[in-house]
Amino acid sequence: MLRLDDIDLIYNAGRVDEVVALRNLNVTFERGQFVTVVGTNGAGKSSLIQTISGAARPTRGRVHLDGRDVTRLPDHRRAGWIARVFDDPRAGTAPELSIEDNLALAMARGRARGLRFAVTARRRAVMREHVAGLGLGLENRLADRVGLLSAGQRQSLTMVMAALSAPSVLLLDEHLAALDPGTTATVLALTTELVRELGATTVMVTHNMDHALALGDRLLVMSRGRVIADYDGTEKSEMTVGGLIDRITGAGDAVSDRSALIEKVAS
Amino acid sequence: MIQVLLDMLVTGLPLVPVFLGIYTVFRLRADFDLTVEGSFVLGGAVCALTLVHGWPSWLALLAGMAGAAAAGAVTALIHLLLRVPVLLAGLVMSIGLFSVNLHVLDTPTLSLGTEGTLFSGFGSLSGRQADLATSGVMAGVVAVVLVAFGLFLRTELGLALRATGVNARMARSQGVNDRRLTVLALVLANGLAGLGASLAVQYQGYADVNMGGGTFVAGVGAVLLGELFVRPSGSKLVRIVGCVLVGTLAYRLVLVGALRVGLPAGDLRGVTALTLLVAIAAERYLGALGGLTRTLARTARSARTPIRQEAA
């Protein structure tokens, strides 16, 4: 279970250029839940992801993962439990390194890195098996530089890397945003398959309302650093794209009723 | 001609570990560490001092390495605690170390006796044979260093080090502690500089407080030169050590050649700078040629395996 308690994330606090990224955020993600998150630019979606991954430390509040307070752990120390796929396909892999080196890097996630060889015959066999599932033929190109791969191939590889160490939380930060429509469909199919296979608590941020409604079993709508709506599976299945957009555009200042919001999120 | 090659070996081989350290920071970490200008001298000074105090030559070699590595650790601390770029931390260190080195040596130039160095046994040999034996011993040390370094890069730790230089955000998200690896890279790079300096000091028979000047630029020049010939990349580890070896020797060949042609020693820094410029120009100009052949090779390969989807 992943729990965010009373999270404030404020940049340049107390200065004229103060930016409130998250304000009094309370969300609980049940184990294995697949949650989609939508909202306009600056709504706090990426801040939510960064707070969970540890890339940003909240100004106030606590982050609990499986009963453990991880608030003070930086991102590299949470990596054993939390895997992340970035919006930029170039961000999730090291282009100068070979496919197998990238995979080996992910395989050591959550363990102390020592003087064992990173790529061994046994590990290569495991890699081949995982990559073969993509159907891209990458299993025959393990020694190739990742820089030679297309955006879709790189993003697929990042997904495989995320799954390698069986994380308990999977963060997808607009991971489809930079892909062309054809590749989007492929990576999307891979996403649903992977989430089902892993059984990890999944938080997927997206700009695409269709994806937000079609995938997952819970939907969060964010605006100005708060969660303004929280739909469970049934509510979500009855929702339309139009209704969702109305909810977001209608938000604005209408969401001043904070107490009602917290009650909703906590339930 | 043979003498030119021997000169290249005896003056170039000690620089191989030094430039390997520079490669580690400059290419693997994509950063600039100027500490090497001072740590090179510190390593040599510590080696000379321990030798004068009667330490065995091998131990003095390791002492020089440790001294320089400590300088790298201080640079890393300045970088992490004061949150200044490695470039600035190294610059401060390279200036400050001059005074430290002078204190260690206690004199601008500390001469060693003819006894007690790695190469003392070769005094009775003729000039050419002595050079041959000297380069043989140096080559042995350098080979151990290159193989050990190559193997290290293949380990999980070495892989993490290579990844942080290419994509630090990704490395962190894969659980790599970036800060710890910065310390490791700087300690390793400067330790290698100290090892090379110790070899040089034992060969030339003295340590001089000014012997480190220009090491950084020379190293970058040698790395660029090596990259022209060998074309290393992040996962081609044999090429990485090969690039440093070839680049260092090619750089020394240029300098030795310049001396043979009759240029005064004072012109060598100018030659170093010119070598650097030529290497950069060749990279720019010939890089297109190399890229073309690579593209052709890739096209040929993808024609054989029709699994590639859209182009990158």
Image (spheres, coloured by chain):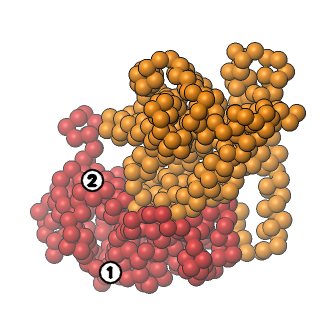
Chain colours: A red, B orange
Q: Position of residue B217 (x, y in %)?
A: 62, 29
Q: Nearer the viewer, residue B236 or B306?
A: B236
The residue where tag 1 is placed is: A32
Q: Is residue B85 visible?
A: no
| Relative depth, front residue between A58 and A205 | A58
Image coords of residue B117 (percent x, y): 58, 36
Q: Secondary structure under badge 1?
A: loop
- Report the Cα–Cα distance between label 2 and label 1: 24 Å
Q: Nearer the viewer, residue A110 or B190?
A: B190
Q: Chain of mark 2?
A: A
Q: Is residue B266 left or right of residue A185?
A: right
Q: Position of residue B68 (x, y in %)?
A: 47, 37
Residue beneath the point at 59% across and 33% down: B115
Q: Can residue A115 be spotted in the picture?
A: yes
Q: Is residue A244 above or below residue B243?
A: below
Residue at 82% over, 17% down: B262
Q: Residues within 10 Å of mark 1 (few under 14, many from 20)?
A: some
Type of amino acid under label 1: Gly
| Quarter of the image that includes the C terminus of chain B | bottom right
Residue carrying label 2: A57
Query: What chain letter is assigned to the residue under label 1?
Result: A
Whether callout 2 and callout 1 share a subunit is answered: yes
Secondary structure beneath label 2: loop
Placement of B163 over or under A157, stated as above or below: above
